[in-house]
Image (tube, rainbow, N blue to C red):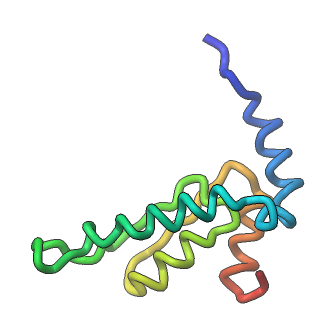
Amino acid sequence: MSDLFDHRQVRRAFSRAAQGYDSAAALQREVASRLMEQLDYLDDPALGRDAPEVVVDLGSGPGHAAAAMQKRWPKAQVLALDIAPGMLAQVRRNAAGGG
């Protein structure tokens, strides 16, 4: 079975778009916001749940959700992963306060 998408082409396209991605990512921001609201169930002490030690943001894009999770759980190791190196460069810029 062949892949539906050419991963190399996807990686290149998202890397090229990384710098201006935020201006066109309204849907991603809305989904991330709703998912962040759902995290209340993960670390509810009343339910006997502690904050996570490791968090993975798979398909992190420019890393805004990863930054929000790091702020929420400062002791956790937060890993931002994305297929596009350009997006990961944006994660580093945003983490350094440049985005």
Q: Position of residue 98 (x, y in %)?
A: 78, 85
Q: Residue at x 62, y 64 (%)?
A: 29
Left or right of 74 in this view: 97: right
Quarter of the image holding residue 21?
Answer: bottom right
Q: Position of residue 68 (x, y in %)?
A: 52, 78
Q: Residue at x 17, y 72 (%)?
A: 49
Q: Is residue 48 above or below residue 26?
A: below
Q: Is residue 16 above or below residue 10?
A: below
Q: Position of residue 17 (x, y in %)?
A: 86, 56
Figure disc tally: 0
Q: Is residue 93 above or below residue 16?
A: below
Please name whichever residue, 54 or 50, is drawn nearer the observer in this view of the structure.
50
Q: Residue at x 38, y 85 (%)?
A: 75
Left or right of 7 in this view: 49: left
- Where, quadrant-wise, is the C terminus in this rendering? bottom right
Quarter of the image holding residue 26?
Answer: bottom right
- Where, quadrant-wise, is the N terminus in this rendering? top right
Left or right of 20 in this view: 38: left
Q: Residue at x 86, y 65 (%)?
A: 20
